[in-house]
Amino acid sequence: LPLVAAGIVASGSRGALLGALVGCAVYLWPERKRLNAVLLSLIFTIFSIFMGYRMWTHPEKIGSDSGRWLVWEAALKGFKAKPLTGWGPETFYLVAWKYRTPAWDTIYAQRTQGNAHNLALELLSTTGLIGFLAFALCLLTELRWGKGYVWNRAALGAAAAALIAALFNPV
């Protein structure tokens, strides 16, 4: 576990770090013991310090955050253009190319982007409502059916961490 935590911190991925925080919370929260509350507070404090340090020492990451807003805006426009079926699986670069802006060209060196840096928005723009609802149905089915078998707090915490990280990172 310490090696995984070190890897997440070393990667500089804020989405993975936030996912780990949520995963730990999901794992620790049901017990509601004083030690768990202390651990959650410690994890949140470390996360906050890390985020502040990264923003202070790497101001270029703020530009990356601005770029994410542009990518997400393009994904929403792509979804609005083809809401039912989307643009096709693994074709986000087409959406990005069509809906890029001059600000996009300033922030990103390349003219297109291969993914939306957000699983939900990428699914909506590339597979439309049909693909997004199919994914959601599979996920909910697994949560429902798997609950009595392999799902325990650790597995649920890991799933929560992965889904949160997928909201900010390519999957």
Image (spheres, rainbow, N blue to C red):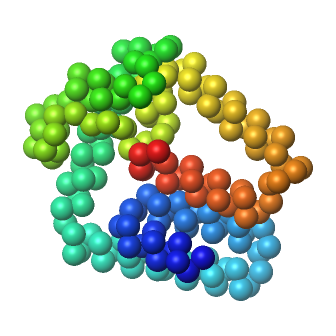
Residue 126 appears left or right of 108: right
Residue 44 appears in the rendering: no
Q: Residue at x 49, y 30 (%)?
A: 123
Q: Is residue 138 left or right of residue 69?
A: right
| Place of residue 169 in the rendered image (x, y in percent of width and height, measured from the top left) | 41, 50
Q: Position of residue 99 (x, y in %)?
A: 24, 25
Q: Position of residue 25 (x, y in %)?
A: 64, 67
Name the image quarter holding residue 134.
top right
- Evaluate whether residue 107 shows in this view: yes
Instruction: In the rendered view, tell whether residue 158 sits above or below residue 114.
Output: below
Q: Give the side of residue 20 with respect to residue 64, left or right.
A: right
**Residue name at image x 35 percent, y 29 percent:** 92
Quadrant hosting residue 117? top left
When the figure is inspected, residue 17 is found, relative to residue 83, above or below; the finding is: below
Residue 155, image x, y percentages: 72, 58
Residue drawn at x 43%, y 19% as measured from the top left: 88
Quadrant where the N terminus sits is bottom right
Residue 81 vertical placement versus 3 (above, below) = above
Give the image quarter of residue 109: top left
Q: Give the vertical position of 41 relative to 130 (above or below).
A: below
